[in-house]
Amino acid sequence: MNNKTKSLVLSGAAVALATPMSSALALDDVLSFGAWVNYTYDVDNDANEDRAGDLDLPAGIIYANHEHGDWFFDSELRFGTGSFQSFSGDDREWGFKELAIGRHYGEEWTMTVGKTEVPFTYSRFNFWPGERLARGFGDQYNPGIRFDFDPANNPMDMSFMFIKSQNWGTDTTSQDDGAGVGAIGQHWGSNETYHKINTLVADIGFTQGNFRHGASFQAGQLANQDGVWDVSGVELDDRFPDADDIDTLSGAQETETHWAAGLYTEGSIEAWDLAAQLVHYDQGDVDEFGELAASDQYTEGPTGVITGNFDPDDGPTGVFTQGSGQVMMLSAGLDAGDWYHYGDLTGRSPDSDFDNQDDTYDLVLGTRYNYGPGWIYAELQLDNITGEDDGITGDGDAGDRDSTQAVYLTMDYYF
């Protein structure tokens, strides 16, 4: 659920997400800890098969929550390769998934400042394989300011957020669960391409019975992370000057716009939890930054100087966005006491000519067992299930991809 103050009772699936994956697990005024370890067997990886799989991507987690009157504090600090965090090539593998201070205003309004959850559609049901092709719109935590409005005895609720940046500073590495650094389908770029800044998000929901129907919207800027040399004002006879004599563009000095809109529903029918969403996204033409970086490369201006940008070492560099297209997700879960069975079907359908990618669908099937202090998960990830040659996921080079399968066994513990 996006709105932390919603009166709708959480479904089993939503509890499953909130408990192991975010600081919603921790009670008020408490310092608690958690850990998980993951085993992966990639059916289509010969090296992985020879090793009989890999035990990898562990994480240690510290949750801190506190309330003082109307004020509250929430944080989640992760350590290890399972934190899905690296800092611009630095070897540190830790980071705050959540770090926020907030205040309640009466019974209806809540303000949160810091790195907190982005109120956009809903997140998936599975634990380890993550958002798959819906990546970029679920389980997002960004620094900014958020307002939640949840009036009592009213089926309507709404959330608004201003995102200053994708992560602290100009860093783009993500701690979205199941999204390793550089993962295929990553929506918001990388430290070598672009990142999200100055974005407005809105979510409006309507609760009817055991279901909540919602609409989400976001719009903002993408900042070029690929530093190119600014050579405006350099004499033509010094076309390749020393780097020390030129200023570099350090992200955020060249921007393009992005927007996305989504419709979704989530709720329960007896022991079943059901959810669905459809999102349209638009990051402009895929080569917007490429055209920008390559424009007016060696043009003589009216005063006899070079205009435009170029890299004196590598020449013009291009940065390509995800263009535009659609993302969909269908999720279902069955509550069977200590057991919970679930599935997530995700798909991405690019509109633009982004590497000639075909419509692609990934499926995750899984089950978890509540053994007391945590959960044991068994999950099957099926990539590119229709076997598209130019699928976004799958095994092989673009133009000749196959469907792939991987098995994940995960165990976590919280205290």
Image (tube, rainbow, N blue to C red):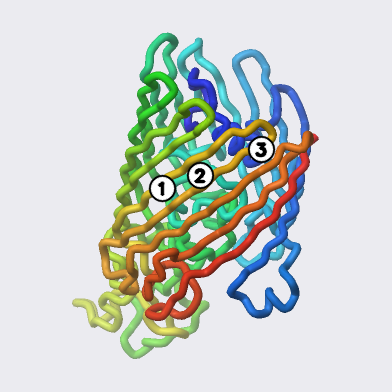
Image: 65 above or below 89: above
- Closer to us: 210 or 109: 210
- The percent coordinates of residue 67 (x first, y second) are 67, 20
Label 2, label 3: how many angstroms apart (C-alpha)?
Answer: 18 Å
Q: Are the two marked residues, 1 and 2, in contact with CB atoms closer than 8 angstroms?
A: yes
Residue in the foreground of this view, choosing between 372 and 22: 372
Q: In this view, does 180 lie above or below 333?
A: below
The one nearer the camera, 218 or 338, is 338
Q: What element carries label 1?
A: strand
Residue position marked by numbered label 3 in the rendering = 339
User: Where residue 71 sits: x, y (%)?
Assistant: 61, 19
Mark 1 crowd level (few <14, some 14–19, many ≥20, 10 Å Cα)? many
Depth check, mark 1 against mark 3: the one in front is 3
| Disc with the residue nearer the chain's start (2 vs 3) | 2
**Residue with the mark numbered 1:** 329
Residue highlighted by disc 2: 124
Rounded to the nearest angstrom, the CA distance separating label 1 from label 2 is: 8 Å
